[in-house]
Structure formats: C-alpha cells, structure tokens
Image (tube, rainbow, N blue to C red):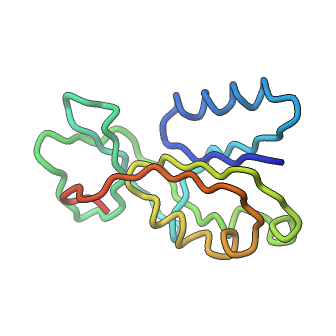
Amino acid sequence: STAWSFDTNSFGILTCLGIALNAKDNKWTIFNKALGEDKKLCRIVSHNINFGDGHTVCDESAELPPDYDVRASIQVEKLDDIVDPDMIAVLHIGVVKTDVKNYEKFILLGGQKFFNTASINLLFIEFLMGISGMQ
C-alpha cells in the first residue's frame, strides 16, 4: 500500500520522509505543494509567541488577529490538477494524512475527483475549529 502526506510544517514533512525512507514494504508519496480549491497565493500566519500555531489565510483583504504575523507566502494548487486522473483510478492508498493549518476544507474541495475515485483505507485530517478570522 501507499501513503500520501500533505503538511505545511517542515518538521511534519521530514517526519513523513523519515518514515518513508525506513519503510521497506510501503511506498510514501510526499508532496511539496500547497493544496486548495483553486490556484492562488496564500499566507501562513501565526501568533508572535507561538510560531507553531500556524494558519492558512488566502483572503488578501482579511485582517490578521492581534499579534499575528505573516510567516510565509505559498502558491496553492488543486489536488485534482496535480494528480494524473488515470493513476487515481488504479491506486490503492493505505493512508492520506493532512496537517495544513486550518485549510483542510479547501483541500477536500480541490480534490473531489481524487477523494471520490481513489481507494483510500484511512484519511487522517488534523483541524481546528472556531479560529476567528481564519478560514
């Protein structure tokens, strides 16, 4: 089986890469891409006293909460645009894991063909609810 990981945190990506390199029977696909419902530029923001408290903001007119700063800008693409549709139909994926800083809904919207077609055993999504001013 295979595992796919989507993570905005470099530590999360490196952790998945370490697991992938040490797994003899499994095949991991790690994407160095930001995913969403359409192609656009977004910002990763976090509180000044907790850099790990990152959130994705794609509305340029959105005001940041007090004491939040922009940490990075990222180009967002749709999952359905970067994965070959012929490959999806024959793939068996053991795990899909996401940790994308309050942007999970938009990955699902941009990957509707993928999630409706691919055979996936486990979908693991980390998310926060109720963050004021965030998507």
Q: Nearer the viewer, residue 45 or 88?
A: 88
Indicate the position of residue 39 as horizontal and vertical percent values: 53, 67
Residue depicted at x 38% and y 54%: 102
Residue 55 placement, left or right of 99 = left
Quadrant for the C terminus in the image: bottom left
Residue depicted at x 47% and y 66%: 106
Residue depicted at x 57% and y 70%: 110
Residue depicted at x 55% and y 58%: 35
Residue 67 placement, left or right of 46 = left
Residue 15 placement, left or right of 95 = left
In the rendered image, the residue lying farthest to the front is 121
Q: Nearer the viewer, residue 121 or 76?
A: 121
Above or below 15: residue 9: below
Quadrant housing residue 121 = bottom right
Indicate the position of residue 89 as horizontal and vertical percent values: 84, 71
Indicate the position of residue 123 as horizontal and vertical percent values: 61, 56
Above or below 88: residue 7: above
Indicate the position of residue 58 as horizontal and vertical percent values: 36, 61
Above or below 37: residue 47: above
Residue 114 placement, left or right of 84 = left
> What is the total number of numbered labels drawn onto the structure image?
0
